[in-house]
Image: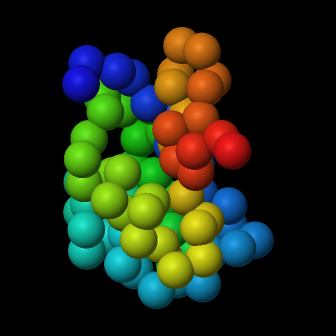
Amino acid sequence: MGDRWHVEVDRSVCIGSAQCVHRAPAGFRLDTARQSHPVEPDIDAAEGVLAAAENCPVEAIMITLLDSGEAVFPPEE
Ligand code: SF4
């Protein structure tokens, strides 16, 4: 893909289900409050991270293109 992504987790929404950690162990980590956060906020585009965002039960994970800020997930309507 070649894109660079910016990844955020909305901690007011995350319910700590850890699915993102299982799908993308290099991408996400749970803190002691069982809230997910990206291991690195700015990453090379990665299928596992996108799959984690798509499968988060509460859509707490947002991915944007690092250079333009354009939405990767959730996609803009
Ligand atoms: S999958 Fe979503 S709700 Fe579950 S820990 Fe990850 S960000 Fe939080």
Q: Where is residue 75? Give x, y as percent.
A: 57, 44
> In screen coordinates, is 41 left or right of 11?
left
Residue lying furthest front = 77
Residue in the image at 54% along x and 13% along y: 67
> In screen coordinates, is 37 left or right of 15?
left
Q: Where is residue 61? Give x, y as percent.
A: 55, 58
Residue in the image at 25% along x and 68% along y: 23
| Image label count | 0
Query: Which one is in front, 40 or 1?
Result: 1
Q: Where is residue 3? Give x, y as percent.
A: 34, 21
Q: Please state, as top left, top right, bottom left or bottom right, where the N terminus lies in the image.
A: top left
Residue 36, relative to residue 19: is it above or below?
A: above
Q: Where is residue 5? Give x, y as percent.
A: 44, 30
Residue lying furthest top = 67
Residue 73, relative to residue 14: is it above or below?
A: above
Residue lying furthest right = 12
Q: Please state, as top left, top right, bottom left or bottom right, where the C terminus lies in the image.
A: top right
